[in-house]
Image (cartoon, grey):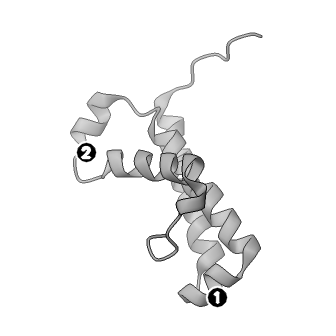
Amino acid sequence: MSKMPSREWRFYLEDMIRFSEKVVTYTHGMDQDAFVGSGLTYDATLRNLELIGEAATHVPDEVRAAHPDIPWRMVVALRNRLIHGYLGVDDDTV
């Protein structure tokens, strides 16, 4: 299997913004009950939150350090929780 070429980290930031915009669009006007009750919206939102966290792992440490107002570790931790702890996802937190 061939290794993928390195990708410029700035593209990951653009991805994060795009995925975030999708989450906002998907959930616009929904309360928590409607969100949790809508399987497609719920699944699509969780998937995009996973992708945001995955993209964040590709942002260099020096860039993260320059922007301490962004909770980088929490973003990545959410991704890990959604992927690896899917049975324990708390709808109140999402």
Image position of 63 (left or right of 93): left
* Nearest to viewer (mark 1 / mark 2): 1
Residue at left 52%, top 74%? 91
Density class for disc 1 (Cα within 10 Å; few <14, some 14-19, many ≥20) is few
Residue at left 37%, top 29%? 60
Q: Which residue is mark 2?
A: 67
Q: Which mark is residue 34?
A: 1
Q: Nearer the viewer, residue 86 or 1?
A: 86
Amino acid found under the numbered disc labelled 1: Ala
**Is residue 88 placed above or below 1 in the rendered structure?**
below
**Is residue 4 placed above or below 71 in the rendered structure?**
above
Among numbered discs 1 and 2, the one appearing first in the sequence? 1
Number of numbered discs visible in the structure rendering: 2
Please state the horizontal and vertical placement of residue 71, each as a whole percent of the image.
Answer: 30, 52
Residue at left 65%, top 74%? 26
Q: Which mark is residue 60?
A: none
Q: CA distance from mark 1 to mark 2?
A: 34 Å
Judging from the image, what secondary structure is the residue with disc 1 in?
Answer: helix
Residue farthest to the top? 2
Please state the horizontal and vertical placement of residue 44, each as a whole percent of the image.
Answer: 69, 64
